[in-house]
Amino acid sequence: MSWAVEEWKEGLSTRVLQKIQELESQVDKLKKERQQRQFQLESLEAALQKQKQKVENEKNEGATLKRENQSLMELCDNLEKAKQKISHDLQVKESQVNFQSGQLNSSKKQIERLEQELKR
């Protein structure tokens, strides 16, 4: 088939044939260059997609960490409130114990006094 492609060149001058050969060589060179650039473009697009995916993953991870942080802050607040309630309850109970201890001491003194009176 290449003989049919070359047939149209028959009868052309050497100078024209040289020019055609230069142009064909230039076309081949440009085709190779285009293929290389196409490969570079595809490689860059793949790298871009990879970076976009990485950014998306990091955004998702950031959002997850933000939610987790919020949850932990709420948990800390709840624990602090529970601690304050327990502390308050403890103070109330200590007050009750102190009051009852005072009543017990008072009752003991009263019993001692009554026992003394009985002995007399």
Image: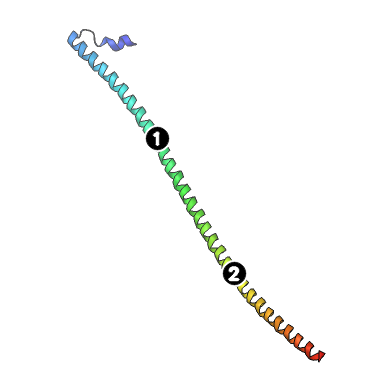
Q: Please give the residue where the numbered disc 1 appears in the rendered image.
A: 47
Q: Earlier in the sequence, mark 1 or mark 2?
A: 1
Q: Is residue 23 above or below residue 118?
A: above
Disc 2 residue crowd, few under 14, some 14–19, many 20+, Cα 10 Å? few
Residue 4 occupies quadrant = top left
Count of numbered tags: 2
Tag 1: amino acid: Ala
Confirm whether residue 50 shows in the render.
Answer: yes
Q: Is residue 30 left or right of residue 106?
A: left
For the residue pair 22 and 58, the one nearer the viewer reads as 58
Say if 43 sits above or below 19 in the image: below
Q: Residue drawn at (37%, 33%), measured in percent from left and top?
A: 44
Residue that extends furthest to the right in the rendered view of this protein: 119
Residue at the spot x=27%, y=20% of the render?
A: 27
The spot of residue 46 in percent (x, y) is 40, 34
Which residue is at the front of the view, 54 or 15?
54
Which numbered dot is residue 87? Answer: 2
Q: Nearer the viewer, residue 91 or 4?
A: 91
Residue 13 visible (yes or no):
no
Residue in the picture at 42% in, 43% down: 55
Percent of width and height locating residue 67: 50, 54
Q: Secondary structure at mark 1?
A: helix
Which quadrant holds residue 50? top left
Q: Tell me if label 1 and label 2 are in contact, CB under 8 Å.
A: no
